[in-house]
Image (spheres, rainbow, N blue to C red):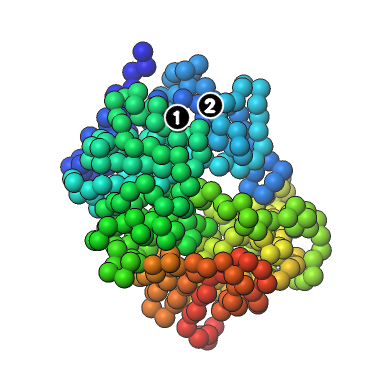
Amino acid sequence: MVKWKSAADRLAGEVTHPISRWRPAVGAVPRHLFVPRWWERAGPGAGFGASTWKLCDGPAEPDAWIRAAYADRALVTRVGLLHADHATPDDQPAGVPTSSAIAPGLVVRMLRHARLTDDADVLEVGAGTGYCAAVLCERVGYRQVTTIEADPYLAKAASERLAGIGLHPRVAHADVSGPPPGNYDRIASMLGVSPVPASWLAALRPQGRLVTPIAGTMLILTADKTPDGGAAGRTEWDRGAFMPAEADPGAPQIPAAVFGAAREADGEQVGPGRYPVIDVARSWDLCSALGLLVPGVQHDFAVTADGRRTAWTVHPDGSWARATGTGDAPPIVHQSGPRRLWDILDGIRLDWLRNGSLPGYGARATVAPDGSICLRHGHWRATLPAAVGPPPPAAGHAEQAAPGVIPQAIVTRPGPQAS
C-alpha cells in the first residue's frame, strides 16, 4: 500500500493558499495513480528540440514514484507516439514530448483563471492523464465536469483512473477542436490553440468564460462570452508551457530538408547578428513574441564544451536561421527562405530594449465568433486569424510573408523611435 496522503497534502500546501478552496481538492487526489509510468530525459536527441528518454515505472520504485508524482512539475507520459504505459524497459525513444501530466501548480492556476462558481458546468479540453479532471471534480462535483481527449487510449485510461477513485465525470474521446458534447459555463483548455475553435465559443453559455493557452506562446488567454457570440478578455500576467492541440493532418509540416539545411547549409544570407545567441525556447517572453509574429516556428539550442552557443529556428514555409557565437559576442548568422527569422528575432529584441517590455502579457483580447483573436496593448496590435489562407505581410521587422496556407499573425507597432 502506497502512503500518499501526506505527500498530497504537502503538495497542496505548496501550490495553494491556506484559505484557497483548491487546497482540499489538490490534497484529496492521489496523483500517483494518474501517472504510474512516465519518461525522464536521458540526453539530447538528434532532432529539433528532441531528447532521448528513459522509462520510469512507479510501482517498481514506490519511493521515486511518490517523489515524482507529488512534486510540482510536469511528467512526460508520451514521446512521439509511444505512451509510457505501453513501453518496455528496453525502449529508449528519441523525440519530443507529445503528452504530459501538467504540473499541479499550473493546473490550479489555470482553473483559478476560470473563476468557477459552485454550480458551473465545466468542460476541460485535453484530459491527458485525468489528474486535472480529478481536481475539478473534487472542487465542483463530478456531475458538473466533462473532459474531452483526442487520444483514444488517454481518454480510456483517464476514465478508468477517475472511476478507480470514485469520480465519474463525462470523459469523451473527441476531436478537441470540434463541437463539444454539450454546453458549458466554463471551458478550460489544457492544450494550446490559435485561433480559438469556433465550436468552443458556440458551446459556451451566455456570460460563460473561456481559459486557454495560445499555441506557440506561453500566453494564457481568459475571455468572457459576448452577445455577438465571441468573447472579450485579456492575456493574463501569467504564463505556462502547454502541449499544442493535435495538429490538423493536412496542415503544413516542416520538411526534413529544412532541418538539414538549418544544421549544415550556408544559406542565402550570412552575416553578423545584433545580439548574443540566446536559447529562444527557454526565453519565454521572447519566444511568445516571436510565436505571435511568426506562428509555427520551432527552435533548438546547443552549447559545446568550448562554450560555443548555437541556436536554430525553422518554419514550415522553408525559412530557417542558424546563429553561432561565444559569450556576449555578436554571432554569425546563416539564414535562408522566404523570411529572415533571425532578423525578425533581433527586431523583437530591439523593441524590448527600446520599450522596456514585450507587449504580449496583459494585452486586451477580443475573440470573434469565428475564433480569430485580436490582442491590443497600447499602440501594439496582434491578430491571429481564423481562416487558413495566403498570409498577409507581417508588419514590423519581418521582411516578407511567405506564400502558402499558414495562418500569419498581423502585428503592428508604434513608429520607430530614436536609438
**Gap in angstroms between the C-alphas marked 1 and 2:** 10 Å
Q: Residues within 10 Å of mark 1 (few under 14, many from 20)?
A: some
Q: Residue at x 24, y 61 (%)?
A: 207
- Give the side of residue 214 with respect to residue 208, left or right: right
Could you say where residue 153 lies in the image, as x and y percent from the top left?
50, 32
Between 222 and 19, the one nearer to me in the picture: 222
- Give the side of residue 65 with respect to residue 112, left or right: right
Between 104 and 209, the one nearer to me in the picture: 209
Could you say where residue 400 lies in the image, as x and y percent from the top left?
65, 77
First along the sequence among labels 1 and 2: 2
* Quadrant containing the C terminus in the rendered view: bottom right
* Quadrant containing the N terminus in the rendered view: top left
Q: Residue at x 58, y 53 (%)?
A: 248
* Residue 391 location, quadrant: bottom right
Q: Report the residue marked by disc 1.
A: 157
Q: Residue at x 27, y 57 (%)?
A: 205
Labels 1, 2: front one: 1
Could you say where residue 256 lies in the image, as x and y percent from the top left?
75, 52
- Give the side of residue 86 with respect to residue 29, left or right: right
Q: Amino acid at mark 1?
A: Ala
Per the rendering, the mark at residue 85 is 2
Dot 2: element: helix
Q: Amino acid at mark 2?
A: Asp
Per the rendering, the mark at residue 250 is none
Q: Are marks 1 and 2 in contact (CB under 8 Å)?
A: yes
* Residue 204 location, quadrant: bottom left
Dot 1: element: helix
Could you say where residue 280 lies in the image, as x and y percent from the top left?
58, 58
Q: Residue at x 65, y 33 (%)?
A: 93
Note whether residue 85 is visible.
yes
